[in-house]
């Protein structure tokens, strides 16, 4: 796949402004797409859209197929008659600049329950046939997910690995009894998914009509506490007691001296091969319903994974174990055709990873914040003049500090290297734009910039600090009025000047 020369903006929908404590798939999302089009941008890149749990990370979702019901636009539900004005009377006071996922868990789920109650009572009859069609089309994952979430609620949110053995191990009788006992709760979960996919589909059509494609994200691994692992345990490395034998992470790196212990279960590639990689084919099919282009997070895991014995306190004690990514990608390509995929090839990249990427013609990634470290930095692959055309260049990603924040805290050697390379001495308030100009001016066909950099925000707007949990991660939102016509005009001028109008 060869990328067209163009540019885009990285922004997770949770960061959109709005009155209900979190970004939604309604008017604010449409306004953002309008602003992208006005700014000459051809791509909107999002993080994974799955339902989040403990830690609020979109990379640790309860399902690889489901959508996040927190994103459902409540104003649209009110317009459709699924909510009434009185339903908003108990709305909490939200911080407009930060997402409080705890409040969302309580209040938004209550709002979605009210919407489902009106639907179940027949107050919006026009949706019944549409909902039934959705249930039938998505039954391959939806039935397991809806029951999984209903069982989690019944167990007070406990992970499935701690459920009674007959439910943990999916004994037929126990599942049948649970489906009957929790039928209403499972339908409520499925209805929330229906609302999400309905609104996301409409928003994606809105973007397509304005020349904006959506770049999505497939985390290479799935969460331990997910319906995928519960329903497909044979495809993962588990013992007979329902516990993982090894978990995923990365060894010590730029972000952490002890590595990153993600805790995701690892794949039994032999078992997946025996089924023709059917689960992966379904996963790509599901993602292509959501996105035009897909970024595979931690692509190197398709060549080999860092396997850490379970349990462990850090990621230091692990080993690289070969994977069957090549065979899997061949199976997916055989089933679905050409793969519209970006390979996240950052970190410890070895020749086998590069060969896997290049043999499938996949564009890789480059991050300019990583380009200026070390003594002889001139050989750094991420310097603008060293980039490849079929590549995606970022000023930074969701795991980096904002560019302004990075410059404020950069080591003197990195600052020196940047000054030498650019023959300039940038101020903190001008650095993010200068780095954006370098990204747009590079030979990489696609340049993507986090919205925080276009807004010239500091570390307070950082989206995530890898290896940590807490209220600073995944919660940032931009404000009403931040996306001005003047900023759109400035970005459009840069886009046109660097030949990225698409």
Image (tube, helix red, strand yellow):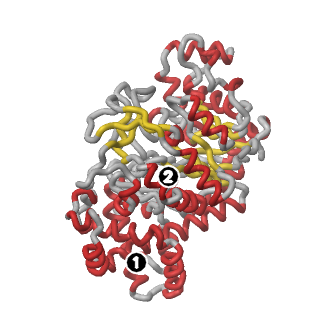
Q: Which mark is residue 265?
A: none
Q: 84 left or right of 283? A: left
Q: Quadrant of residue 146?
A: bottom left
Q: 166 left or right of 388? A: left
Pinpoint residue 198: horizontal percent, then vertical percent: 55, 70
Q: Quadrant of residue 101?
A: bottom left
Q: Residues within 10 Å of mark 1 (few under 14, many from 20)?
A: many
Q: Which mark is residue 48?
A: 2
Residue in the foreground of this view, choosing between 238 and 114: 238
* Spatial CA span between label 2 and label 1: 25 Å
Q: 180 left or right of 459? A: left
**Which residue occupies 38% across, 75% down?**
188
**Counting residues from the N terminus, which is met first, the one under dot 2 or under dot 1?**
2
Q: Residues within 10 Å of mark 2 (few under 14, many from 20)?
A: many
**Which residue occupies 40% across, 50% down?**
60
**Which residue occupies 31% across, 63% down?**
106
Q: Which residue is mark 1?
A: 116
Q: Secondary structure at mark 1?
A: helix
Is residue 47 shown to the viewer in this render? Answer: yes
Q: Secondary structure at mark 2?
A: loop
Pinpoint residue 473: horizontal percent, then vertical percent: 40, 42
Pinpoint residue 1: horizontal percent, then vertical percent: 71, 46
Residue in the foreground of this view, choosing between 482 and 226: 226
Residue in the foreground of this view, choosing between 304 and 375: 304
């Amino acid at each position: 796949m060869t990328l067209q020369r163009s540019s885009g903006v990285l922004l997770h929908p949770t960061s959109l402004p709005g009155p209900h404590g979190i970004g939604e798939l309604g008017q604010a999302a449409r306004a953002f797409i309008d602003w992208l089009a006005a700014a000459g941008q051809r791509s909107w890149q999002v993080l994974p859209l799955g339902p989040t749990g403990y830690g609020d990370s979109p990379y640790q979702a309860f399902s690889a197929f489901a959508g996040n019901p927190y994103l459902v636009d409540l104003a649209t539900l009110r317009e459709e008659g699924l909510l009434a004005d009185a339903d908003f009377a108990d709305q909490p006071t939200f911080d407009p600049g930060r997402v409080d996922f705890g409040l969302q868990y309580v209040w938004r789920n209550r709002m979605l329950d009210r919407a489902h109650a009106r639907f179940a009572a027949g107050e919006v009859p026009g949706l019944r046939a549409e909902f039934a069609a959705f249930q039938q089309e998505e039954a391959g994952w939806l039935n397991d997910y809806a029951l999984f979430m209903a069982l989690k609620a019944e167990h007070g949110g406990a992970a499935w690995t701690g459920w009674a053995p007959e439910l943990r191990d999916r004994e037929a009788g126990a599942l049948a009894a649970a489906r009957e006992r929790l039928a209403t709760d499972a339908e409520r979960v499925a209805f929330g998914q229906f609302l999400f996919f309905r609104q996301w589909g409409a928003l994606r059509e809105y973007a397509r009509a304005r020349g904006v494609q959506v770049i999505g994200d497939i985390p290479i691994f799935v969460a331990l506490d997910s319906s995928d692992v519960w329903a497909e345990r044979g495809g993962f490395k588990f013992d007979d007691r329902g516990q993982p034998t090894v978990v995923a992470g990365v060894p010590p790196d730029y972000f952490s001296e002890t590595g990153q212990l993600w805790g995701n279960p690892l794949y039994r590639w032999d078992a997946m091969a025996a089924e023709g990689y059917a689960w992966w084919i379904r996963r790509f099919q599901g993602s292509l319903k959501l996105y035009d282009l897909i970024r595979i997070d931690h692509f190197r895991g398709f060549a080999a994974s860092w396997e850490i014995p379970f349990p462990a306190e850090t990621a230091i004690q692990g080993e690289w174990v070969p994977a069957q990514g090549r065979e899997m990608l061949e199976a997916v390509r055989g089933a679905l055709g050409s793969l519209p995929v970006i390979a996240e090839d950052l970190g410890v990249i070895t020749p086998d990873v590069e060969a896997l990427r290049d043999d499938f013609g996949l564009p890789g990634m480059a991050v300019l914040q990583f380009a200026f470290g070390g003594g002889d930095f001139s050989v750094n692959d991420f310097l603008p003049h060293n980039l490849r055309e079929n590549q995606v260049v970022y000023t930074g990603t969701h795991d980096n500090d904002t560019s302004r924040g990075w410059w404020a805290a950069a080591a003197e050697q990195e600052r020196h290297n940047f000054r030498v390379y650019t023959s300039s001495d940038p101020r903190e308030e001008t650095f993010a734009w200068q780095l954006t100009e370098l990204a747009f001016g590079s030979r990489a066909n696609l340049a993507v910039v986090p919205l925080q950099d276009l807004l010239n925000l500091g570390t307070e707007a950082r989206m995530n600090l890898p290896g940590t949990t807490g209220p600073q991660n995944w919660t940032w939102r931009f404000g009403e009025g931040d996306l001005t016509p003047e900023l759109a005009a400035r970005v459009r001028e840069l886009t046109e000047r660097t030949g990225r109008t698409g």
